[in-house]
């Protein structure tokens, strides 16, 4: 499985992982997908993950005081409430990027389903 906008990072019969990167060019914006047979369900498990551990969008020296203030406020929220909402966004580049992602997902699911059938036939 290899698509132009999809990078397969792990490809086993029961476990497939692939990544795709965001349109914005930020190398930390990755949409990861894991398709696996976890042995507990009759169908493959599909997990999407999107790391969003960054709190700052505009990293410039000009807004350094504002960034430091926000870090202090966010730290206080985490310290006193134990919660901090962090969100980010992932942008597909165009229609073909979405189609590549859909195709990779379908292909990974088919691969894992085939593995499950073979495994069940042996039982
Ligand atoms: Zn992005």
Image (tube, rainbow, N blue to C red):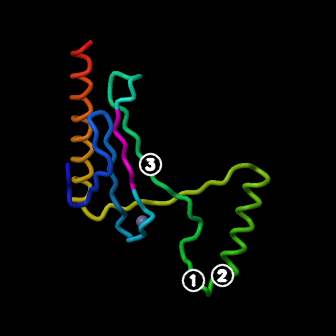
Q: Is mark 1 within 8 Å of ligand 1?
A: no
Classify 75 as above or below 1.
Answer: below
Q: Secondary structure at mark 2?
A: helix
* Residue at position x 49%, y 55% in the image: 51
Classify 2 as above or below 113.
Answer: below
Residue 4: percent from left, percent from top: 21, 60
> Which mark, residue 64?
2
Marks 3 and 1 sit apart, C-alpha to C-alpha, by 28 Å
**Residue at mark 1:** 60
* Residue at position x 33%, y 37% in the image: 15
Label 3 Cα crowd, 10 Å radius (few <14 / some 14-19 / many 20+): few
Label 1 Cα crowd, 10 Å radius (few <14 / some 14-19 / many 20+): few
35 falls in the magenta region: yes
* Residue at position x 41%, y 22% in the image: 40
Marks 1 and 2 sit apart, C-alpha to C-alpha, by 7 Å
Classify 102 as above or below 68.
Answer: above
């Amino acid at each position: 499985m290899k698509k132009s906008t999809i990078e397969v990072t792990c490809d086993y019969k029961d476990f497939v992982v692939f990544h795709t990167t965001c349109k914005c060019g930020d190398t930390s914006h990755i949409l990861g997908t894991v398709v696996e047979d976890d042995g507990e369900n009759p169908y493959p498990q599909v997990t999407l993950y999107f790391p969003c551990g960054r709190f700052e969008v505009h990293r410039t020296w000009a807004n350094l005081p504002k960034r430091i203030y926000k870090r202090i406020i966010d730290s206080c929220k985490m310290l006193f409430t134990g919660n901090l909402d962090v969100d980010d966004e992932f942008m597909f580049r165009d229609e073909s990027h979405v189609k590549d992602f859909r195709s990779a997902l379908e292909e990974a699911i088919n691969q894992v389903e085939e593995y499950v059938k073979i495994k069940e036939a042996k039982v």
